[in-house]
Structure formats: C-alpha cells, structure tokens
Amino acid sequence: MDESLEDELKRANQERQDIVKKYVLGRKQLDKLEGNNINKWEDPDFGLYYKIDRYGFIHTEALSREFDENEKKEKEVEIQRAQKWLKMHKSFEKFRNYNREKLQRRIFKGIPDKLRGAIWLKLLQVEKQMKDNPGVYNKMLNLAYNHSTDIRQIDNDINRCFRDHEYFRERYSTKQQQLFNVLSAYSMYNMEVGYCQGMSSIVGVLLFYLNEEEAFWALHALMIEKKFAMHGLYIVGFPKLMRLLTHHDKILMKFLPKLKKHFDKQNLDAVLYSLKWFFVIFVERIPFSLCLRVWDVYLLEGERAVTAMAFTILKLHATKLLKLKDMDAITDYLQYKLNKNFGYSDNYVIKSLETSIIELRGKRMDLPPPANDVEFPKCEMGQFIEPTIEKKLGLRAECFTDSERNVTEFVIHRNEENGIDGDEDEDHEDDAISNYNNTVENSMLIRRFKSMNSLNTTTSIATSINSIPSEFNQNDLDDDDFVIVETTRL
C-alpha cells in the first residue's frame, strides 16, 4: 500500500472515531467540553412555539380547536379500550394463532398509544429474537464503532430525522444517540444492506416506542420476515421498490383509470409522489397520528397494507387530483399538503383502508407478484466482511455494475420496441390494461431505474446529487421535478 493511500485510510478511520465519540458522549457531556464543534444550525430554533402535540411534535403555529378536540376524543376512546388490550397482550399468541379475526378487528380500530410499543414487540416477535441472540446487538455495535464504512452517511442523516420532534431536535440528544447506534450496529449485522437513506426514518419511528436493542431487532424483523421483506427495498437496484411501483401502476389502471390517464398526461411517474409511501411506510407523507395507525395495520398485514394504503390515498383524493393540471401541483399536494391536513379523520381513512384491502383481494391484487431470490439475504447475518479500500475511503462508484447496465439496456430496448400511445381512447381501457406490461411499464422503468440506482447505499455510494452536471445549480432544483431531492430527504 503506497504512503498516500495509507494516509487516506488513517484519515477515514480518524473521522469515524471522531463521529462515534460525539454520540458516545452525548449532548450533556459535549456541552461541558470547549470546542465541541456543534454548529448553531444543527439545533433547530424552536424558541417560539405554540404547542407540542401528544406525540411530541413541535408546532410553530397554533393548533386548531378542532385538532385539540380530536386529540381529547382519541384519548378518551383509548382509555376505554386499554383494558381489553391489556387482556389480549397477556394471551397474545392465543389470539395470533386461534382468534386472528378478533386481533385484526381491534388493530384496525387502533392500538392505544400507551400499549403500542408492547403490541409492536409481539407483532414482530422481538422478544424471541432477543432471547435467541443474547449479546449480539452489543457485539455488532462495537464492530460498527471500529469498522463500519457507513458511519459518515449515518451521521449526516441523523440530524435530518424528525427535526420537529422534541426527542430528536437537539444534536446528539439521547434519541439521536440511540438512532445512531441502531443504524450503525445494523450496518454490520446485515452487510448486504449496510445502510441506506430511509432506514433512519424507519428506526426513528420504532424508537418512539421501543428501546435501543428492541428497535434493532424490530428493524431486522422488518428486513427478513416474508410479509415485510424490506431487505429488497434497500439492497442495490432496489428490486422490491421497483416491484411495488409497477404493481401500484397496475392497480391504478384497473381501479382508477381516469386518474392514471390524468397522471400520464402530466408525465407524472408514480416514483415522483410515492417514494416515501413504499420506502418508509408513509412517514412524513401523512399526519403522524394516521401514519401510526397505518403502521399498526402494516405490522399485522404486511406489504398488502402498503399497496392498499397507496390506493386508498388516491381513491379518497381522486376528485381533487383530477382538478390539478400540472405535475408540480399534484406532487406538492400528495407530498406535502396531505401531510399537513389529510382532509379525513384517521378512523375514516383506516376504515377505507380496510375496504381497499378487501377490494384488492377480490381481484387478487392485494399483493404484488412474488419476489425473486435477489430480494432476499444471501449472506449469513452478523458475518463480518472486510470492506474494500474504496468503501473504507468513501470513494463514489465511477460507473454502474454489469447487471445495472444490462437492465438499463434491456428496458430501453423494450421501450423502443413498444412505444407509448399517449392518446389512447378510454373506450379501449381493457386493451390498455392487458397491454400495460408492454407499454407504460417499460417506459416508467427506465426513469425509475435511473432514479433508484442513485440512492445512497453501501454498494452504490454515488448519489444523484453527486451525479448532477456541474453546470446545474443544486439550489435551483425542485424536488417535484427531480427524484434526487426526495431521495436524499429519506
């Protein structure tokens, strides 16, 4: 190894050690040190705020009276249901195995917030994982502190996660420490995935209700359990995300053809509005109270809850969306406006979600097509693989892999062969559906493949922002026009 390369490795190791030290010390200890290098911008300025809601989110505008009244009603209902849930929790396996219908009915009605963590542990069978793997979490965390090549990217993303929440807003707070530890440890436990942007939001939600080690094993359950299989969302190429997006388009063609045609007319690919729906299970795309209810259903039903919720959102808001006449307005509505005000009560939406699942199941479209082997783990969990020099130094990939190039060439070739007739008459709707795989799907896959392969992962370090030609000013880019800003906010 030449001297310059050895110096670069020393620099990378020192950078990792410096980052780890800050999280190990935490904010209270860092504040006692002179020159702790915490910049003012790293702490959001919430000197003036009106209220913290029941979930801990800080609002800089006064909450409406209706909002306060709804919170009060929710708490009253939860208190009434809590006793039933406590009894169910004591005999959870009996309900899971022999009375699933009752369990399902209660989950759709809503898990009391104070019991949500305990029920999530049961749904994900976290306690069994912890019992079967004593000491593994701490072992992985120590390995990560000394060897993880994802530390720098994890550190960058920590301070983007739930910036408006009292637990996460302060740099190196207890929750930021826990989030850093879980993500770092998992980057060593599942080295095929390592770390990918978006995982921080998943773990952030888990940490609202679970402790550090519980969140680690809950994340692992979401990654490898068949009904979740999120491993395929985060590995290079993002095969599951591609599969979910394709299935989502087919649902629109079947159930909401007018809206699908409207989106196509505006050149609106589903990836531009639904990335966080599938990638982080609707976090920051719908109000948090509703997001938790969706997560409750997701942990019971698995991925059918995600496909059905995506359908439900568009179904409930189809009339409004059809009136929006450009791509920017549609994406802004779906990405931001619905997060601030969904327009329907949580109970109404979850009831609609339940109806959507039944509706899709009736057409055998509640689940996407089965996954290929590529979506599932190939390596043994917890097996340390020595990182390459390029990964240790954080060097970006210079080009796509052979498999990535082959897929791109295949999709482009298919698109050139088939083409798209954007003026297809509505009277030929059935033909459009039957020919869908040979037309729209291939065109969309080109854009998706190019966009998805620019997300940051351990196996594909280059990001879309790094790939922007120098003549473009990043500050001028609009995340309704480019997937890159959306992905980097994951």
Image (cartoon, grey):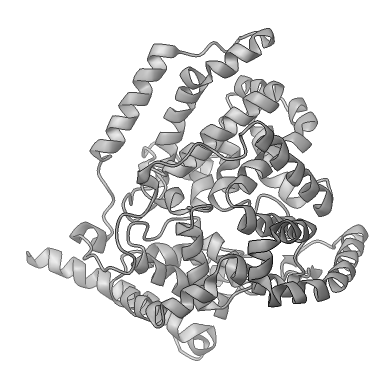
Q: Residue furthest front?
A: 98
Residue 431: x percent and y percent? 59, 12
Tell me which corner region of the image, top left, top right, bottom left or bottom right, holds residue 175: bottom right
Whether residue 290 is visible here, answered yes or no, is yes
- Residue appearing at x 49%, y 22% in the figure: 437
Relative horizontal placement of residue 254, taking residue 202 as reference (left or right): right
Asked whether 214 or 178 is in front, the reply is 214
Residue 428: x percent and y percent? 64, 9
Tell me which corner region of the image, top left, top right, bottom left or bottom right, holds residue 210: bottom right
Relative horizontal placement of residue 148, taking residue 177 as reference (left or right): left
Residue 7: x percent and y percent? 16, 69
Q: Is residue 170 above or below residue 224?
A: below
Q: Is residue 171 above or below residue 248?
A: below
Asked whether 231 or 465 is in front, the reply is 231
Residue 371: x percent and y percent? 44, 42
Relative horizontal placement of residue 484, taking residue 386 as reference (left or right): right
Q: Quadrant of the N terminus?
A: bottom left
- Residue appearing at x 7%, y 64% in the figure: 2
Whether residue 44 is visible here, answered yes or no, is no
- Residue appearing at x 79%, y 32% in the figure: 320
- Residue appearing at x 23%, y 63% in the figure: 387
Q: Is residue 407 above or below residue 11?
A: above
Q: Residue furthest left?
A: 2
Relative horizontal placement of residue 203, taking residue 430 as reference (left or right): left
Count up the numbered dots: 0
